[in-house]
Image (cartoon, helix red, strand yellow):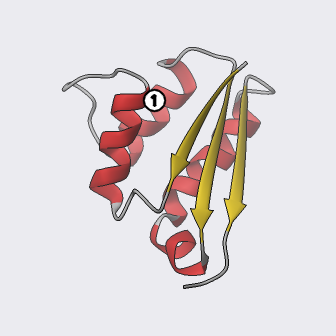
C-alpha cells in the first residue's frame, strides 16, 4: 500500500490542495478541481490501495478544509479498506 502525505503547512487554500492532489496522482490539466471531481477520482481514478495522510492540521485549517476531510472519510468507508485516511493534527496557531 502506497502512502501519500499532504502537508498543510505547504497548502494554504483549496486551489493549492487541488493542485497538490493532481500533482501527487499525476492527473494533469483535465482534473476538475472541485469536490465532485475529487470524489470521482478518489473512488475510481487513482491506484488503490493507498494511504492518504493529512499532516499539520490545526483547528483553523480543519474548518477551512472540512469538506475535503469529510469526503476522504466517506471515501474510506466506501472503498472498504482500499483507502486509508489519517489526520495528524497540530496545536492551533
In the rendered image of this protein, does residue 11 appear above or below residue 52?
A: below
In the rendered image of this protein, does residue 85 appear above or below residue 58?
A: above
Give how far across and how far down residue 73 sits, in percent: 68, 48
- Tell me the quadrant of the picture where the N terminus can be found: top right
Residue picked out by circle 1: 40
Q: Which element carries disc 1, helix, strand or loop?
A: helix
Work out whether residue 21 or residue 77 is closer to the camera in this orientation and state it: 21
Q: Image point 57% across, 48% down: which residue?
A: 71
Residue, far bottom: 93
Q: Image point 61% across, 45% down: which residue?
A: 72
Residue, far top: 47
Give how far across and how far down residue 48 sits, in percent: 64, 16
Give how far across and how far down residue 13 sits, in percent: 33, 63
Q: In this view, does 30 lie to the left or right of 91?
A: left
Q: Is residue 39 left or right of residue 75?
A: left
Q: Could you say which quadrant of the image residue 40 lies in?
A: top left
Q: Image point 71% across, 27% down: which residue?
A: 79
Amino acid at each position: 500500500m502506497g502512502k501519500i502525505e499532504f502537508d498543510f503547512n505547504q497548502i494554504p487554500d483549496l486551489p493549492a490542495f487541488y493542485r497538490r492532489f493532481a500533482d501527487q496522482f499525476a492527473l494533469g490539466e483535465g482534473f476538475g478541481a472541485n469536490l465532485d471531481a475529487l470524489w470521482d477520482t478518489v473512488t475510481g481514478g487513482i491506484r488503490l490501495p493507498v494511504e492518504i495522510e493529512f499532516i499539520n492540521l490545526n483547528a483553523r485549517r480543519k474548518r477551512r478544509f472540512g469538506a475535503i476531510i469529510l469526503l476522504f472519510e466517506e471515501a474510506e468507508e466506501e472503498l472498504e479498506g482500499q483507502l486509508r485516511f489519517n489526520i495528524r493534527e497540530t496545536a492551533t496557531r
